[in-house]
Image (spheres, rainbow, N blue to C red):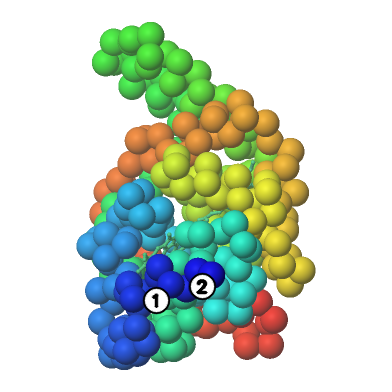
């Protein structure tokens, strides 16, 4: 009889020492391991399912890392990318978490322009550049996406979507990668994210995601990932603000 572990026991690449090494590196402020997946500038890497982190404010990064540590994110059997992040998050002390947050905030990155009238701007842009059939389709999707955003997402994610709303624990979603957006919406819709009874915020997204059809998802992903969520000028950047760790009595934190 062939034992289940025969084929794999000799090739396992993650011996405990390696994990101890990673924990130590993270504890002394060496975040190379984060950049291996998320990119040198935390710009994201679809090849390993790792999104850009530059979009994210301190409070949200902290909240999600806690989620993986406590098991309300990333533990669903079907959530393979979630399992990966969950294993990494569990190697982090609270100092390491605060350190990496500071590092992400320090990255000299373009902030996202609140694309208030993304549809109108897109139209203007296309008129100036001359319009092709493909552009027209995209322009229509952007406009429709903006309408859906305003009706269904604005109340939590903010009037323009690029800023998020900390009070609602809803992160900025303007400028996010289309592939990551679709992946997360699918996860919410299937209860692969927002599955835990303690995760009231994830559950809000489960209810939202279940009401969206494929057309709306396409429109939203085209709108939210549109290049018009581009860089703002240095002088227009909001002041970077690193909030203190949340109330430890909060069961989610
Ligand atoms: C082996 C690859 C890998 C490494 C190393 C890694 N990540 Fe990730 N990270 C991922 C993947 C994959 C996801 C997407 C998880 C999902 O789909 O839910 C992710 C998601 C995240 C998110 C959530 C983004 C969001 O929009 O919700 C944060 C925050 C994050 N990682 C932080 C970190 C930090 C900090 C480190 C270093 C300590 C790190 N990651 C190291 C692969 C990695
Ligand atoms: C009732 C408030 C609420 C509404 C309405 C809402 N969201 Fe959310 N959304 C949240 C919260 C809270 C989170 C954070 C969940 C978590 O902590 O895991 C979130 C997270 C997300 C994420 C994950 C972001 C990431 O980086 O992983 C996406 C994508 C998203 N929302 C898209 C949408 C879209 C699109 C709409 C409109 C169709 C919408 N949301 C409407 C509250 C809301």
| Nearer to me, 183 or 243 | 183
Dot label at residue 3: 2
Q: Residue reaching furthest front? A: 1
Q: Quadrant of ligand 1?
A: bottom left
Residue 59 seen: no
For numbered disc 2, what is the local secondary structure? loop
Could you tell which of marks 1 and 2 lies nearer the N-terminus? 2
In-image side of 177 versus 65 (left or right): left
Who's the residue at 44% across and 88% down the image?
93
Of marks 1 and 2, the one in the foreground = 2
**Residue position for label 1:** 9
Residue 163 seen: yes
Q: Is residue 241 above or below residue 27?
A: above
In-image side of 214 versus 161 (left or right): right
x and y, in percent, of residue 63 in the image: 55, 72
Q: Is residue 112 above or below residue 238?
A: above
Q: Is residue 251 above or below residue 41?
A: below
x and y, in percent, of residue 145 in the image: 56, 30
**Does mark 2 have its CB less than 8 Å from ligand 1?**
no
Who's the residue at 26% across and 15% down the image?
129
């Amino acid at each position: 009889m062939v034992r289940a572990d025969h084929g794999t026991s000799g090739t396992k690449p993650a011996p405990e020492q390696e994990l101890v090494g990673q924990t130590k590196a993270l504890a002394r402020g060496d975040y190379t391991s984060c950049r291996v997946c998320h990119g040198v500038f935390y710009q994201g890497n679809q090849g390993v399912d790792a999104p850009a982190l530059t979009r994210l404010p301190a409070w949200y990064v902290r909240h999600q890392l806690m989620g993986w540590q406590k098991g309300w994110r990333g533990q669903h059997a079907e959530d393979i990318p979630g399992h990966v992040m969950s294993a990494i998050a569990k190697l982090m002390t609270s100092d390491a978490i605060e350190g990496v947050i500071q590092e992400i905030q320090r990255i000299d990155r373009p902030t996202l322009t609140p694309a208030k009238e993304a549809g109108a701007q897109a139209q203007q842009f296309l008129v100036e550049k001359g319009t092709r059939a493909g552009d027209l389709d995209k322009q229509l999707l952007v406009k429709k996406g903006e309408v859906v955003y305003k009706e269904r997402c604005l109340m939590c994610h903010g009037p323009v979507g690029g800023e998020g709303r900390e009070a609602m624990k809803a992160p900025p979603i303007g400028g996010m990668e289309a592939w990551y957006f679709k992946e997360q919406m699918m996860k919410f819709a299937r209860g692969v994210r927002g599955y835990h009874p303690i995760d009231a915020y994830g559950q809000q997204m489960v209810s939202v995601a279940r009401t969206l059809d494929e057309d709306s998802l396409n429109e939203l992903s085209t709108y939210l990932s549109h290049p018009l969520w581009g860089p703002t000028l240095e002088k227009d950047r909001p002041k970077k603000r690193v909030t203190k760790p949340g109330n430890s009595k909060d069961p989610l934190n």
